[in-house]
Amino acid sequence: MESDPIYADSYLLGLAVRHQYRYVSFDARLNLHAVPGAKAEHLIVLSPQWVRLEFKGALRVWSPILF
């Protein structure tokens, strides 16, 4: 069974809210109202230009993180 990425993002946002962290994602479709207690300060949406970074000629791709 394949999971929809939006459900995974909602779950991770819920963890961030519960532990008073921020969730960072590239997906601007994530709805704060889907997670009880979520506020704007719990979610950071990175713009697409942050996706690719050059590091000594190698392409690095960022993935969503909690901090």
Image (cartoon, rainbow, N blue to C red):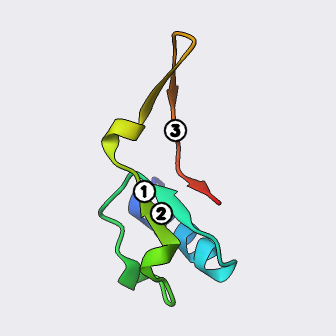
Task: Identify the residue at the far bottom of this view.
Answer: 37
| Disc 1 element | helix
Other-residue count near label 3 (Cα within 10 Å), few / some / many at <14 / 14–19 / ≥20: few
The disc at residue 9 is 2
- Is any part of residue 4 visible from this angle? no
Give the CA separation, mark 1 to mark 2.
Answer: 6 Å
Between marks 1 and 2 in the image, the one whose residue lies nearer the viewer: 2
Q: Amino acid at mark 1?
A: Pro
- Residue wearing tag 1: 5
Q: Residue at x 65, y 81 (%)?
A: 18
Other-residue count near label 2 (Cα within 10 Å), few / some / many at <14 / 14–19 / ≥20: some
Q: Residue 19, position in %: x, y?
A: 69, 77
Q: Residue at x 65, y 78 (%)?
A: 20
Q: Earlier in the sequence, mark 1 or mark 3?
A: 1
Q: Residue 52, position in %: x, y?
A: 42, 30
Q: Residue at x 48, y 75 (%)?
A: 41
Judged left or right of residue 14, residue 5 is left
Q: Amino acid at mark 3?
A: Trp
Of 12 and 58, nearer the camera is 58
- Is any part of residue 11 visible from this angle? yes
| Disc 3 element | loop
- Residue wearing tag 3: 62
Label 1 close to label 2 by CB (< 8 Å): yes
Give the CA separation, mark 1 to mark 3.
Answer: 16 Å
Image height check: is 67 above or below 52?
below
Between marks 2 and 3 in the image, the one whose residue lies nearer the viewer: 3
